[in-house]
Image: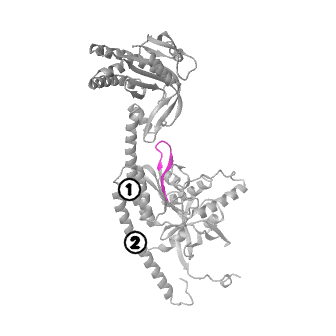
């Protein structure tokens, strides 16, 4: 029995884009929109690596990340805390992600330009379903 | 789990969650029992027919009726080219049959290329995302202006697709795809169900296709040598039944005195003579790789350079004609002893003809139309017993091998001027 429940799966199909938050070595945070968080197994998720960007660099400096994913049917939001494990450039997880990206890329004339470089595998260290209303921004501690 | 101030113990939340779990399990159970029904229904129906269209129809109807996949299609891999062709659809305004998908193009093309199932539930979001990436890259000059995106069969606004390669012993037969306008329409259970259907469909489609090929092969073998018929079926040669224009050498032959013979002889004698004559001429046609276009009683029309192109069509035509004359002379000697007054006359011409399937739905024949066929027929009808009349157009390339004599001028329907006719006296260097 892993940390991720089955009911989180609809939130990991990329229907509603997710956000990932990382920190640089000096603690500077970075939030970035990502198209999909892939379900790997009950303890792991994968993020696609297409371009070298700030998220990728931060992960190299500080292997922890936070993402949220949203179930498009119920709009339940799940907060996940992640720890980077490894980058995969082959294997079943990579293949599934790469096939999808290639299919979409071919639809917009980006075949060969937009492609998966690696599947970055993360272990999920915490998962929280935020049921009901979210706190108004003003009530979130530390945010003014 | 975050505590709700109105329900500190989380009881209400727990009840809701339990109910959701029960609902989900019930749904899963209902679909599991569907799984069994699918296996039973499809396997019994699908094995009851060898008709390809019927097989495809059964599969798509079952996907819709039993499993609720409202939009589905089956694409078959082209036997010759590396493309997938839509063979059957269900749930679309336009049937779309015949549309092509290149390997690696879109969800279906990638599934065909990789031979792996794909389930995707966010096509709209992904395409929008990639378009924006593309726009940014174009603005930065990193990529050129986008090539036109391929137009793919199916729903123009599909959000979810589940596509499965249909394989038989690692050979790709086609792709089975279902789609929906709803995002995330398919889940892992759908994958399982589609895989069950797909495995049965692949085998049934492959069997039906093989059967269709054998049938078609039988039809083609009526016109072409067995080797050529197989070549056509395997896709190594163009479909000869598609109308096309080509330069051919045409040989016409028939028996002088046959009409009178038919009127005076017994049917058994008549059929015996015809069988012998057809059998002997048939051997020579095969030996020279000619295409027998038609029999009409004692008449035959054979041409060369179609469907199999040959560099020496005219030479083959006259060599076959000479061989036929020799063989017919032997037969005629026997016929004469039995009192049958029969002799062979042959006409040979060369020119462009329109070739392909001629006829109407339900009765098609492979045939050639053109002045060249009229000319060959006319030369044949003018030929005296034992003559092979050829048109002068054959001479330039065959002068080296032919010894000919002038016969005179012939009026030919469709030609303004009379045509010179030449009789082949003999081959200078018999093969």
Tell me the subunit letter for badge 2: B
Mark 2 vs mark 1, CA separation in Å: 22 Å
Residue shown at 65%/59% (left/top)? B131
Residue B262, horizontal then vertical, whole percent: 33, 22
Residue hosting label 2: B30
Tell which of B200 and A69 is nearer to you.
B200
Magenta stretch: give its range. Answer: B76-90
Q: Is residue B21 magenta?
A: no
In this rendering, position of residue B39 left or right of residue A18: left
Q: Residues within 10 Å of mark 1 (few under 14, many from 20)?
A: some
- Residue B200's tag is 1
Tell which of B183 and A52 is nearer to you.
B183
A110 is higher (above) or lower (below) than B388: below
Residue A117, horizontal then vertical, whole percent: 58, 57
Tell me the subunit letter for badge 1: B
Residue B54, horizontal then vertical, whole percent: 40, 53
Tell which of B158 and B188 is nearer to you.
B158
* Residue B192 visible, this orientation: no
């Amino acid at each position: 029995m892993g940390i991720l429940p089955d009911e989180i799966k609809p939130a990991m199909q990329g229907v509603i884009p997710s956000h990932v938050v990382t920190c640089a070595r000096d603690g500077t945070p970075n939030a970035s929109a990502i198209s999909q968080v892939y379900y790997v197994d009950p303890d792991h998720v994968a993020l696609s690596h297409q371009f070298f960007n700030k998220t990728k660099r931060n992960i190299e400096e500080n292997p922890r990340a936070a993402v949220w994913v949203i179930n498009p049917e119920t709009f339940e939001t799940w907060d996940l805390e992640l720890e980077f494990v490894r980058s995969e450039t082959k294997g079943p997880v990579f293949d599934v992600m790469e096939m999808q990206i290639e299919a979409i890329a071919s639809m917009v004339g980006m075949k060969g330009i937009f492609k998966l470089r690696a599947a970055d595998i993360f272990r999920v260290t915490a998962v929280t379903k935020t049921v009901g209303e979210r706190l108004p921004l003003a009530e979130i501690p530390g945010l003014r | 789990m975050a505590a709700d101030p109105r329900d500190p113990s989380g009881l209400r939340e727990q009840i809701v969650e339990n109910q959701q779990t029960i609902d989900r399990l019930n749904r899963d159970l209902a679909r599991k029992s569907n799984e069994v029904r699918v296996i039973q229904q499809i396997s019994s129906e699908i094995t009851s027919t060898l008709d390809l269209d019927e097989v495809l129809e059964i599969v798509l109807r079952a996907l819709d009726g039993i499993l609720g996949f409202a939009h589905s299609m089956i694409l078959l891999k082209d036997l010759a080219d590396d493309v997938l062709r839509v063979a059957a659809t269900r749930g679309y305004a336009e049937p779309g049959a015949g549309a092509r998908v290149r390997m690696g193009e879109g969800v279906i093309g990638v599934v065909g290329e990789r031979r792996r199932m794909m389930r995707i539930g966010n096509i709209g979001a992904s395409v929008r995302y990639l378009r924006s990436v593309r726009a940014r890259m174009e603005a930065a000059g990193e990529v050129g202006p986008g090539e036109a995106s391929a137009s793919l069969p199916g729903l123009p606004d599909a959000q979810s697709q589940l596509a499965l390669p249909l394989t038989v012993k690692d050979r790709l037969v086609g792709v089975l795809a279902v789609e929906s306008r709803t995002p995330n329409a398919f889940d892992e259970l759908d994958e399982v169900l589609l895989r069950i259907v797909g495995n049965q469909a692949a085998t049934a489609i492959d069997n039906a296709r093989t059967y269709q090929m054998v049938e078609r092969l039988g039809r083609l073998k009526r016109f072409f040598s067995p080797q050529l018929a197989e070549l056509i079926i395997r896709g190594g040669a163009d479909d000869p039944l598609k109308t096309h224009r080509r330069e051919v050498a045409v040989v016409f032959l028939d028996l002088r005195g046959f009409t009178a013979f038919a009127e005076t002889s017994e049917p058994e004698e008549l059929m015996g003579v015809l069988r012998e004559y057809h059998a002997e001429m048939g051997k020579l046609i095969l030996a020279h790789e000619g295409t027998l276009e038609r029999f009409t009683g004692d008449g035959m029309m054979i041409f060369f350079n179609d469907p199999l192109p040959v560099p020496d069509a005219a030479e083959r035509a006259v060599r076959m004609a000479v061989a036929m004359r020799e063989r017919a002379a032997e037969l005629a000697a026997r016929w004469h002893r039995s009192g049958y007054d029969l002799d062979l006359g042959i006409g040979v011409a060369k020119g462009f003809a329109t070739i392909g399937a001629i006829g109407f739905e339900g009765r098609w024949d492979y045939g050639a139309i053109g002045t060249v066929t009229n000319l060959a027929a006319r030369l044949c009808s003018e030929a005296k017993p034992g003559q092979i009349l050829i048109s002068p157009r054959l001479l330039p390339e065959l002068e080296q091998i032919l010894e000919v004599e002038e016969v005179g001028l012939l009026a030919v329907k469709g030609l303004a001027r009379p045509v010179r006719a030449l009789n082949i006296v003999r081959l200078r260097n018999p093969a």
